[in-house]
Image: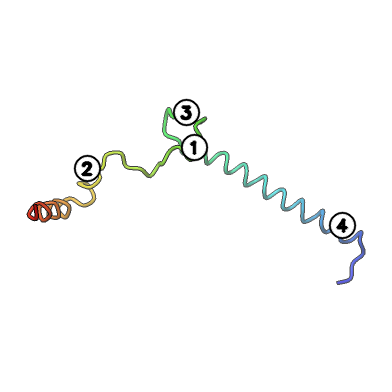
Amino acid sequence: MAQTQKQRLALIRKVSKKFNKKLQRNQRVRKTETVSYLPYGYPASKGYDDVNINHWTDAPKYLDEHYGDRMREQNEYERDWD
């Protein structure tokens, strides 16, 4: 694998072009993904970490919808201890 300096520099240039292309593609993708997730009417200037899209704002409704009878039974059980 003995190479001349000229061959090594050519290889470095080739690999760096490929790497830079990949970085640019990833930056393009990130920009489009970070803006599109924001809720309607939310100011995009607040940034990516300011909004949790997985946050359920109505906890009782969430519990009733997903846990229903089990939640009510647990609450009754806990009331009996008081």
Q: Secondary structure at mark 1?
A: helix
Which residue sits at x=82%, y=53%?
Answer: 13
Q: Which residue is mark 1?
A: 36
Screen quadrant of the N terminus: bottom right
Q: Amino acid at mark 4?
A: Leu
Q: Residues within 10 Å of mark 1 (few under 14, many from 20)?
A: few
Of tags 2 and 4, the one toward the viewer is 2
Comes first in the chain, label 2 or label 4 = 4
On the image, which quarter does residue 9 sit in? bottom right
| CA gap, disc 1 and disc 3 | 12 Å
Confirm or deny contact between disc 2 and disc 4 (CB under 8 A): no
Is residue 82 toward the left or the right of residue 29 in the image? left
| CA gap, disc 1 and disc 2 | 29 Å
On the image, which quarter does residue 42 sit in? top left
Which of the labelled discs sits on residue 9, or is there none?
A: 4
Q: Amino acid at mark 1?
A: Ser
Comes first in the chain, label 1 or label 3 = 1
Q: Secondary structure at mark 4?
A: helix
Comes first in the chain, label 2 or label 3 = 3
Q: Amino acid at mark 3?
A: Pro
Q: Which residue is mark 3?
A: 43
Comes first in the chain, label 1 or label 2 = 1
Q: Position of residue 76 (x, y in %)?
A: 10, 52
Q: Residues within 10 Å of mark 3 (few under 14, many from 20)?
A: few
Q: Residues within 10 Å of mark 4 (few under 14, many from 20)?
A: few
Which of the labelled discs sits on residue 60, or is there none?
A: 2
